[in-house]
Amino acid sequence: MMNTFHLRILEADNEFFDGECVSLVFPYPDGFYGVQANHQNMVCAVDEGIANYTLPNGEKHYASISDGIIKIEKNEVLILVNTAERPEDIDENRTRREAEDAKEMLLQSRDPLAFREAQEKVERELNRLKLLKYKALK
């Protein structure tokens, strides 16, 4: 029998995933971090990027996630992020337009706060596009 752990991914206003997994890879400040059943207890930051998790039947799932936090305790994993998206929920053309608009805002921004907001938007849209490319390769 395959060892599993319980994974919950919660967005600010939605439950993104709740179920059993055999593995999880998520972006964190120093690169990517992997989790399998019976992982040591820990809490750490989650960076914006692509996460993937494998179900007991071998099916792999991918998600574009915002930064947040992860808690691993007693074979249960909880990821709290502002946003999480599946590739099938992303409109590629709209995302490309949004990325271009955000880049333009970034170039025209004079206010530090507006600059940071535009920078975050560019990163978010590029991450969404990366998820679509990543999924297409699999």
Image (spheres, rainbow, N blue to C red):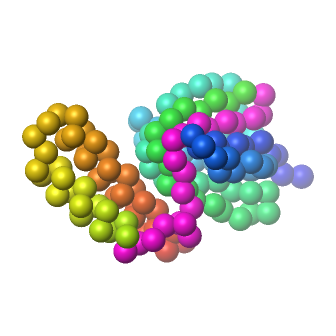
Q: Residue at x 77, y 34 (%)?
A: 75
* Image position of 95 (left or right of 42): left
Q: Residue at x 52, y 47 (%)?
A: 83
Q: Nearer the viewer, residue 19 or 120?
A: 120
* Image position of 81 (left or right of 76): left
Q: Residue at x 60, y 43 (%)?
A: 13
**Eyeballing the image, is 138 above or below 71?**
below
**Eyeballing the image, is 114 above or below 103?**
above
Q: Residue at x 54, y 57 (%)?
A: 85
From the top left corner, tell me how far across and down residue 89 is, in percent: 54, 66
From the top left corner, tell me how far across and down residue 134 is, in percent: 47, 66
As drawn, which residue projects farthest toward the top?
A: 42
Is residue 52 inside the magenta stretch?
Answer: no
From the top left corner, tell me how far across and down residue 128 is, in percent: 42, 60
The number of discs equals 0
**Eyeballing the image, is 97 above or below 1?**
below
The quadrant of the rendering that contains the C terminus is bottom right
Q: Which residues are magenta?
A: 74-93
Q: Nearer the viewer, residue 10 or 113?
A: 113
Can residue 1 be seen here? The reply is yes
Can residue 51 be seen here? The reply is no
From the top left corner, tell me how far across and down residue 82 is, in percent: 51, 41
